[in-house]
Image (cartoon, rainbow, N blue to C red):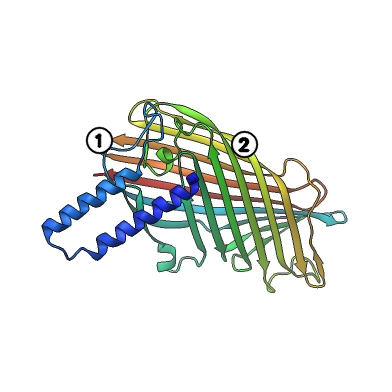
């Protein structure tokens, strides 16, 4: 059985065990204690040691609770140089998002709940979700954002015009997969999920695949040029590459993580549809067309508690000199506090 299938079976068995525990909760106190001990023993058997324990170990505690405050935002830059002598540049930004998250992790089973104050108090109407799976050997991110509160500045040669925030809607998908070569000594989870502990400094080359899709819908209220009403611009790109990550352990109470994974775009598509005009197709390849994922983490440990700052940046550049160009930057910052039992 392949390692991927083994992991899927392991996760399925964990969820079945958890469901059994919940269904049998009305049992006697003695029976509950005995049952939980049996379940804990089975879950522990799934956590096989596959790392060099001189560098990476699991926490001694079984239960980890984290509280996180998440901040995120996005910026866009669009350049259109196919209008004769006129250079049109759009600099756009979405509102900063803020969410509060609590998560409970027991023997590798994680449950999280997020609350968005912006939606509760009607500060903004954007939608965003993140799915993160950080493993020592491999992992992936999936980020979706629909932003209705996007505004900025349009520049045509020396003429500038403010773009109100209710004129544009953007929908973005960002996904990336990584594979760590030195996964027995270098740990992404130690830096981002705190399900492992990095004991000594170590680094690794990282292979990755990245994908991004950005769709921009410009409503009828705003006309970019006289007699022309852009409706939809859609870009898609796929990249592969190799990067490097390093976990620095200056003392046993600190962990600093730095990594960058640049991927060169091997396939791309840029389309634009407007009143009476549409264009679609793959544009010529040119450097530096790429997708870049950068990660930073700073964790401080004290007794059975920890606090930290996490940041992930996704940046894409698509286009070439003298033609269409699209730059997109998606960032996320997390402030966290955790305690282990």
Counting from the top left corner in percent of width and height, residue 89 is at 73, 54
Position of residue 280 in the picture relative to residue 150 (left or right): right
Give the Cα separation between the discs numbered 2 and 1.
37 Å
Q: Which picture quadrant has residue 146?
A: bottom right
Q: Secondary structure at mark 2?
A: strand
Q: Earlier in the sequence, mark 2 or mark 1?
A: 2
Q: Secondary structure at mark 1?
A: loop
Q: Which picture quadrant has residue 20?
A: bottom left
| Residue that carries the numbered disc 1 in the rendered image | 303
Looking at the picture, does residue 186 appear above or below residue 218?
above
Q: Quadrant where the C terminus lies?
A: top left
Determine which of the numbered discs, if any, sits on residue 242 in the image: 2
Q: Residue at x 65, y 48 (%)?
A: 316
Residue 102: tell me if it is visible. no
Determine which of the numbered discs, if any, sits on residue 26 in the image: none
Position of residue 72 in the picture relative to residue 53 (left or right): right
Counting from the top left corner in percent of width and height, residue 240 is at 65, 43
Q: Nearer the viewer, residue 27 or 320?
A: 27
Counting from the top left corner in percent of width and height, residue 277 is at 82, 69
Q: Are marks 2 and 1 in contact (CB under 8 Å)?
A: no
Position of residue 237 in the picture relative to residue 33 (left or right): right
Tag 1: Cα neighbours inside 10 Å, few (<14), some, or many (≥20)? few
Q: Nearer the viewer, residue 268 or 3?
A: 3
Number of marks in the rendered image: 2
Residue 55: tell me if it is visible. yes
């Amino acid at each position: 059985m392949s390692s991927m299938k083994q992991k899927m079976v392991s996760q399925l068995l964990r969820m079945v065990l958890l469901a059994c525990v919940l269904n049998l909760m009305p049992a006697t106190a003695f029976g509950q204690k005995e049952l939980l001990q049996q379940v804990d023993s089975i879950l522990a058997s799934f956590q096989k040691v596959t790392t060099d324990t001189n560098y990476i170990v699991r926490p001694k505690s079984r239960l980890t609770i984290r509280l996180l405050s998440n901040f995120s935002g996005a910026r866009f830059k669009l350049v259109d140089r196919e209008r004769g002598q006129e250079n049109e540049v759009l600099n756009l930004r979405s509102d900063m998002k803020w969410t509060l998250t609590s998560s409970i992790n027991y023997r590798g089973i994680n449950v999280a709940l997020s609350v968005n104050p912006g939606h509760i108090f009607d500060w903004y109407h954007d939608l965003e979700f993140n799915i993160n799976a950080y493993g020592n050997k491999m992992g992936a991110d999936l980020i979706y954002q629909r932003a209705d509160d996007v505004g900025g500045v349009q520049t045509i040669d020396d003429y500038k015009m403010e773009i109100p925030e209710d004129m544009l809607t953007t929908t973005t998908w960002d996904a990336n997969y990584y594979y760590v070569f030195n996964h027995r000594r270098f740990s992404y989870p130690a830096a981002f999920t705190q399900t492992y502990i990095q004991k000594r400094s170590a680094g690794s080359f990282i292979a990755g695949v990245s994908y991004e899709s950005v769709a921009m819908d410009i409503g009828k209220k705003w006309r970019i040029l006289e007699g022309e009403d852009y409706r939809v611009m859609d870009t898609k790109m796929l990249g592969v590459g190799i990067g490097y990550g390093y976990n620095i352990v200056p003392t046993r109470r600190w962990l600093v993580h730095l990594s960058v994974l640049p991927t060169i775009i091997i396939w791309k598509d840029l389309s634009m549809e407007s009143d009476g005009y549409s264009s679609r197709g793959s544009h010529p390849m040119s450097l530096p067309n790429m997708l870049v994922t950068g990660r930073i983490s700073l964790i401080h440990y004290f007794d059975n508690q920890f606090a930290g700052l996490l940041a992930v940046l996704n940046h894409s550049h698509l286009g070439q000199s003298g033609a269409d160009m699209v730059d997109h930057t998606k960032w996320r910052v997390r402030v966290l506090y955790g305690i282990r039992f």
